[in-house]
Image (spheres, rainbow, N blue to C red):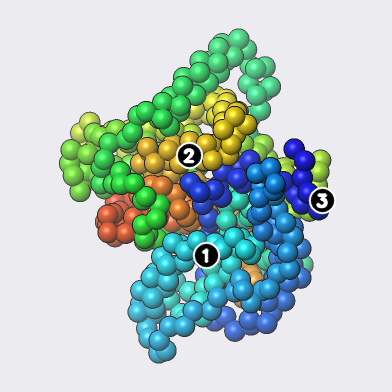
Amino acid sequence: MEFEEGLEPVSPTGQYFNSSVLSVSIIAVMEFEIPINSLPSIMSLLKDVFLPINPRFSSIMVTGEKGEKQWKRVEVKLEDHINVPIFPIGLSPDSYDEYFDDYISKIAMNHFPQNKPLWEIHIVKYPTSNAAGTIIFKLHHALGDGYSLMGALLSSMQRADNPSLPLTFPFRQRSESKSDRLSRGVSQLVSLIFNTIHDFGWSVLKSNLIEDDQTPIRSGEKGVEFRPITISTMTFSLDHIKFIKDKLGTINDVITGIIFFGTRLYMQEVCQKSSKADSTAIVLLSTRTVKGYKSVKEMIKPESDTPWGNQFGLLHVSIPKFTNLKSTNPLEFVLKVHKIIRKKRNSSSVYFTGCLLSIMKKLKGPEAASKYIHRASNYSSMSISNMIGPVEQMALVKHPVKGLYFMTLKVPQSLTITMVSYMGNLRVAVGLEKGFLDPHKFKSCVINAFEMTFQAAHDIPT
């Protein structure tokens, strides 16, 4: 394609996520230990550190003469991107919780104007039960995936205990490359081919023909992405998760299995028949073969092996059914989920799905690929994704960050779950269709599932 001078082409995934069909965003919520009273310092940080991280933070998406989308650099007026809400004065933290929840639900529904860069910051100075002050970063998914955007946010942070030292992250096992798989033998190659054909075929069917049943976690209504949401969070100890992991498998599969278990508990509690309904989750799988975060400088290099952008795939994972709740062993349920995900990881279906989207884009344009992704999400019941946060406490302009979580917005589903590790804990955030799912009951069911699984692990001899 020919592009206008000085303009950068928008990546295919960036075009999929910012179309007339899809407009997916991410919010990252930082909870601070002390009140936020340094707005000039934050403005200076945004100007001197945040904006130079990547040209996309200073660009708008425009359409060229031939219909191709491109990033166009513009002058950024910081005051147009910073919002400071006004709540009543002198309320209790519990009362401010309600105002904060309503505010975050409101900004989650708002669309980004296309005439300015696709990001904004909301500074909530009022104390809640979780923090003395809160900053909400809202960024459009077209700017990059969670890995890229997390890297950008972390580039603006410092270690709270010693700003001269870098933040460190939990060890992340390197993803096995396709060449590694092939080297293990003919039987593994046959398994890889079979799993790829099966998973890719199933993904195409699930994205076009087979819808999940309508259940307490899936309303099945059209335009569900435009309905208000409620965001609820819960925190689990990484040490407790690792204790369960020692019995079963990888840490992500453990918590995913527990969340699926809690989801089935919720479904049965609301409607007993739904515990045997066909329900599918879309699990976002990073296609980056890295052990940890790279610096933003490394990501934007042309020859980088972890380039900036959207690099992930979608896995359709069936949520195991309850045959009999009383006889269901939590560890067996979690282990079953682990085996399902492990089998799907031993497949290259996500790469074939990427090729399919590329073919759609070339033949019918990016809108066709957006419709495919929208349909794949809408026909499923929930989505789940995770990111890795720093081990040490971080600070923003000398304000220690007490807690951290994120949420994906405008996904055409009634239930969205995200996870991020930070300072030895795992923060799980749940986005629920307002008025359809009960946030308190769902949270209670997930916590109950975790406690049941943890206790079952304790009961097994070492």
Q: In this view, does 262 lie to the left or right of 299?
A: left
Q: Is mark 1 on a helix, strand or loop?
A: strand
Q: State the separation of the CA atoms marked 3 and 2.
A: 31 Å
Q: Foreground: 307 or 338?
A: 307
Q: How crowded is mark 3: few (under 14 residues within 10 Å), some or many (20 or more)?
A: few
Q: Foreground: 393 or 311?
A: 311
Q: What element carries label 3?
A: loop
Rendered position, 278 above or below 162: above
Residue holding disc 3: 5
Residue type beneath disc 1: Val
Asked which quadrant contains residue 326, the reply is top left
Residue type beneath disc 3: Glu
**Residue plotted at (54% across, 62% down):** 112
**Observer able to see residue 323:** yes
Residue mark closest to the camera, 3 vs 2: 3
Q: Residue 371 carries which label?
A: 2
**Residue 388 image point, x, y percent:** 58, 51
Q: Are marks 1 and 3 in contact (CB under 8 Å)?
A: no
Q: Is residue 66 left or right of residue 462?
A: right
Dot 1 or dot 3: first in sequence order is 3
Q: Residues within 10 Å of mark 1 (few under 14, many from 20)?
A: some
**The C terminus, quarter of image:** top left
**Residue 27 image point, x, y percent:** 52, 60
Residue holding disc 1: 29
Residue mark closest to the camera, 2 vs 1: 2
Residue type beneath disc 2: Lys
Q: Is residue 365 left or right of residue 56?
A: left
Dot 2 or dot 1: first in sequence order is 1
**The N terminus, quarter of image:** top right
The residue most toward the bottom is 90
Q: State the separation of the CA atoms marked 2 and 1.
A: 29 Å
